[in-house]
Image (cartoon, rainbow, N blue to C red):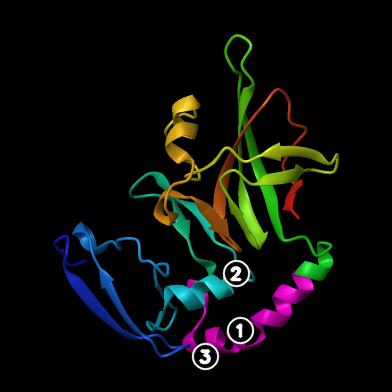
Amino acid sequence: MANYKIGDTRDLGACVACGNVIVIETENEGLFRPQRCGNPVKLADGSWLCGSCLKKLRVKYPQEYRMEPKQKRILPYERASELTAEAAKKELEHVHDFLEGLRERYGFHQAVFFVENVEVKKGGFLKPSLFTVTGHVVYGSFSALDEVCIGSGGQKAMIRCLHEPYSPVPVSDMTIQRGTNKLLIDYAWAEGGEVASFIFQEKSLDLKPGDLIVRD
């Protein structure tokens, strides 16, 4: 892969779905710098889908995190990258109907999050525990400081901050102070189809993999 200097730009051509020109900034080793509309993705036939169109498709093709053998760490993977340009365009034509079907299936909540993993770090003396809940947003969006409904028991809790999924950095009170009310690239909110980690600070939280977190 070609090397690029920070500040360099690269023209990837037009998005196969909407026709907008995709121009990115690159880091060393050709990695994308975070784009305001979201990073584009290269499709199975070598064409490119812009970040805005990719976001629309994620509700049907949710983002995943997979182990990268060479780098030996878990990295984001876009399932939509397995589509061809023609298939991506067809999927985008019907994605609104698919989204409405999801809303009906989940009771028309504003946003729904599917829990895949729960980690608990006990708080100090007289301090509540820190719960790091990782999963993906089924649809809608969640932000730091949102009040949400937890699992089937209906417990109310506040998302203290959104943390980087599968981050090697241990969660602490400092994580919450750094993570609250940050910009998009610092996980201030998570949208439909994205993998995210929510941090809760509660005495107890009845939550397990397979449960839902909802925002009304």
The CA span between labels 1 and 2 is: 10 Å
The CA span between labels 3 and 1 is: 9 Å
The residue tagged with tag 1: helix, strand or loop?
A: helix
Q: Position of residue 131 (x, y in %)?
A: 62, 31
Q: Position of residue 134 (x, y in %)?
A: 60, 44
Tag in front: 3 or 1: 1
Question: Which of the two discs, 3 and 1, labels the residue nearer the N terminus?
Answer: 3
Q: What residue is at 49 percent from the left and 65 percent from the top?
A: 78
Q: Is residue 108 left or right of 185 when viewed as pictured?
A: right
Q: Main secondary structure of the magenta part?
A: helix
Q: What residue is at 41 percent from the left and 49 percent from the top?
A: 186
Question: Which span of residues is magenta-colored?
Answer: 81-102
Q: Mark 3 belongs to which amino acid?
A: Glu
Q: Mark 1 belongs to which amino acid?
A: Glu
The residue tagged with tag 3: helix, strand or loop?
A: helix
Q: Please name the residue that numbered disc 2 is placed on.
A: 61
Q: Residues within 10 Å of mark 2 (few under 14, many from 20)?
A: many
| Residue 69 shown in magenta | no
158 in relation to 172, above or below: below
Q: Position of residue 29 (x, y in %)?
A: 21, 59
In depth, the one of 131 and 16 nearer the eye is 131
Q: Residues within 10 Å of mark 3 (few under 14, many from 20)?
A: few
Q: Please name the residue that numbered disc 3 is placed on.
A: 86
Q: CB under 8 Å between callouts 1 and 2?
A: yes
Q: Which label is found at residue 91?
A: 1
